[in-house]
Amino acid sequence: MDTVRARTIAPPERRRLHRMKRQLTNTVNASHARIVLLSSGSVCNREIADRVGRCPSWVRKIIHRFNLQGLEGITWYPWMQVRNEPRKFVADVVEEIVEVALSPPQQLIALTQWSLAKLRSYLIEQRIIPGISLDWLRSLLLRSGVHWRRTKTWKESNDPEFYEKYRKIRRLYARRPAGGRRICVDEFGPLSLQPRQGQCLAGAGKRVERLRATYHRTGGVRHWFAAYDLESDRLCGCFAASKAGPDFLKFLKWLRRRYRSHETLHLILDNYKPHCTAEVMKWAGEHHVRFYFTPTNASWLNRIEAQFTPLKKFALDNSDYRSHGELQQAIENYTSWRNRRRPITVTSWKNYQKQRRAA
């Protein structure tokens, strides 16, 4: 029984324990603090039980909780408890709140998602807590690592050669072939001339930016054939009005000219039909280009997909380009900055102020 001892107490914890021991309005916390302090002073558990008026098994439980959860594990607040219910430690209450928050709301409240107000109402109705403010509930969830996140979709691959293609691409990612370059290829688009919503900073006296609404897009579309070089961490590409087989072959020739002729290009790309036409495959075999096709419905294996998200955020969102020339220039501005070929500054702050005053 006396083998259970309190762990080493840090100085901040010891100061808090002494404050808890002197609490006159909360005798539960005072006795818990005495148990931990006496145990750290090498007092046996049976003698501790006699001094604080508790049974030895309770003393061992308090010491165990302190060793595992710290001060939160032995703290008890009356305002966190529901009347006519067994007493719970703060750590137990918070753990139960987190468990409810992470449970499916469709089964608990017949709604598709939680909100702080709905979560609080459910906790009160279920007598988990008598009451709590929204700010305190938000703080408890954040302390426990519970955050609001967007849900994502997932599509399972039904490719019969999935694992063969998967392992082939993973081996390529793990080790660069001798005398070769690993390049991820994909199309970004279609890109039409339309206003795109985004985010902006707005403060006192600054109105949120407005974009026009459009339903008729008569400017046509463009496609950006993109290539992400894993060796140099560079993103590049060229634009085309369509993405048929001849357009893709033209892009491959443009990409081939960017590297030395003796280097073999190992391209990771999806199994889109124009990627594997007879003309494309013949040209690739004659010019040291090897294809690694991702499995069906498994484009997440292509690492260029992760490059398109920031591109869309910083080059397209919150924009309203009126010509494809402007749109292409915006994408090129982003890629040149991303590839560390220009600094972030385009216009100095002083020149911007002069232009604004002149306008």
Image (tube, rainbow, N blue to C red):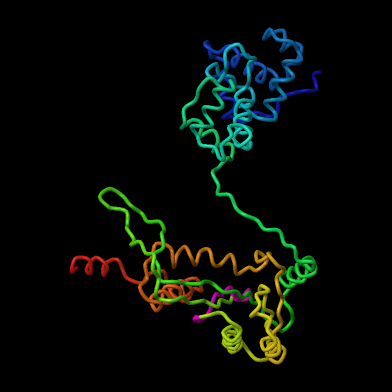
Q: Quadrant of the N terminus?
A: top right
From this viewpoint, which residue is outermost toward the front?
216
In the image shown, does 53 or 95 lie closer to the viewer?
95
Left or right: 38, with 312 as reference point: right
Residue 304 percent location from the top left of the image: 60, 69
In the image shown, does 48 or 66 lie closer to the viewer?
66
Left or right: 155, with 217 as reference point: right
User: Which image quarter: residue 28?
Assistant: top right
Q: Is residue 284 above or below residue 134?
A: below
Left or right: 149, with 348 as reference point: right
The residue depicted at 69 percent of the width and 25 percent of the height is 65
In the image shown, does 112 or 44 lie closer to the viewer?
112
In the image shown, does 258 or 10 lie closer to the viewer?
258
Please tell me whether residue 238 belongs to the stretch shown in magenta. yes
Magenta highlight range: 228-241
The residue depicted at 58 percent of the width and 49 percent of the height is 151
Q: Is residue 325 above or below residue 151?
A: below
